[in-house]
Amino acid sequence: MSEIQPVARSNSNEDELNLARQGENNVNDNSVNNERQLPSLPDIDNSREAWFYVIASFIQEMLFFGPLFSTGIYLKYYAASPDFRSASEPQISLIGTLSLFFGYSAGIPLLYLYNHFPRSMRPSMWAGMILCSSSLLVASFVKDVKLLIIFQGVGPGLSGALCAFPIVRWIPEWFDKRKGIATGLIFSGGGVGGVYMPFLYDLFLDKLGYKWSLRIFAISTAVISGMTISFVKPRVPISSKSNVIRMPMPNFFQTFFTSWGFLFLFLATLLQSFGYFNVALFLPRFSDTLSSATGAGLLGAFNVSCLISQILWGHITDRISPSLAMSFSSGLGLILVLFLWGFNQDYLGIKVLMPFAISFGLITGGFSSMWSQSAHELLGDQSLDKEKMSLLWSGLSVARGIGSILGPTIGSLLYKPPSTMSTSGFHRWGSAGSPGLIALVAASLFGSCLISLFNYSLNKFIKPLLKEKSMRLNANSTNCDIAASNYDDTAAGANLRGTQKNPRIHSNIIEMNTRNW
């Protein structure tokens, strides 16, 4: 028996070790990464796969958002084309505004979709590529502006959202210490596309017309996107077999409707978008009577300055309050609109339009780069909640999407082509781009500046003052309670000393206290 017992213990130890290993495997399988396959993952920040991800994502942004920022060239062509002579100015502008609206506003529904169905993210990127190419191909065969609104507006805008939001969700998997520079490089793709695509659009429209231009870009988008989309993938692959444990999403109502701070940010972004997208979409139209290359040059210069502005204002918000930065951006943009654009006496004055395009892009083009710090400031101690941060960022993106469609739609009603303006109109304020349109842009930026400044004052001065006053009231209340308690103890002690001399009174007090208990 003495020789058998050690053997039994050895087998028991091996069994316990095997059970422990099985338990560890079960725990790992049931953890948050149970949907992920974990053999030999690439390194974070420095791996070759991580930078392939950046390059491929940059190309995707360039292909899908570069055209959205360059639609003004097509709008100018359609307005002058005999094929669309019967179309009104608001109808033509909807081609550009709807593409921007869906590109910006689809974030919240896609965020909930990807949270419930994580395996749908990669297929959605392929679906976005197919949708964009097929929409442009169909648009090349139509002659009705209403159909162009659907196939050149809604289709490419929605496809841009389908391709962009999975990229946003996967960036934290690939980068930690270099997340900022990786994000900046990826989203600069849209700005780079907005720089060179106006010149390509102008060249193809001039040589081939809009039909073959759309077909060429549809085919090139499918080929280039199809070659690079395979490199846009999560660092930790999603398993196709095991169950996926989903992260709980923040409460929608509590995130958006219980904070005055978010309401102010939403309104400031909405009004800024009213003014910004009127300039972005109508800028090529300001030079209608000049060569088409002039309009492309204006839009290209504007997009270059917006690309620089994203980096500039992102750097500024690391050092000052984002609400204060928003008020500076809108206020300086207002000054440029009133004095540089508003007092331009010559409608064809490229000497004024080019400086205005560059300076306005530098001042107002980086508004969206302030959203991350704005959400961080709004959440405070909860800023580490990535799901809530993403939801707030998507909410501000919706505000920008709404502004991108409402602002230019109203602006198109106020815009007056040069053929409808009298000669005397070139000698009054606002004649360089229609007084009503300039007034709309100026009023929108003024409202955004005021709301941002009030939000900054609320966070910087009013809230701390109210908090300090509340603390003083609580301190005074506490002191009063302590004083009252001491008084009660003193009075009770005095009564007790008085009743000790009279046993009957003492017994009555004890009986009364017992009844109270």
Image: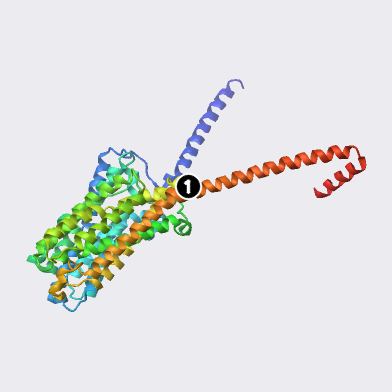
Residue 48: x percent and y percent? Answer: 25, 40
Colouring chosen for the image of the structure: rainbow
Residue 277: x percent and y percent? Answer: 26, 62
Could you tell me which residue is drawn at 31 percent across and 52 percent down? 328
Given residues 13 and 178, the one toward you in this image is: 178
Given residues 279 and 327, the one toward you in this image is: 327
Q: Secondary structure at mark 1?
A: helix
386 left or right, relative to 503 = left
**Residue marked by disc 1:** 464
170 left or right, relative to 500 = left
Quadrant in which residue 158 is drawn: bottom left
Residue 465: x percent and y percent? Answer: 49, 48
Given residues 149 and 419, the one toward you in this image is: 419
Label 1 sits on what residue type?
Answer: Pro
38 left or right, relative to 276 = right
Relative to 205, does residue 498 appear above or below in the rendering? above
Asked whether residue 166 is in view, the answer is: no
Residue 77: x percent and y percent? Answer: 14, 69
Label 1 CA crowd tier, 10 Å (few <14, some 14–19, many 20+): few
Q: Residue furthest left?
A: 207
Asked whether residue 466 is in view, the answer is: yes
Relative to 147, does residue 56 appear above or below in the rendering? above
**Quarter of the picture holding the N terminus:** top right
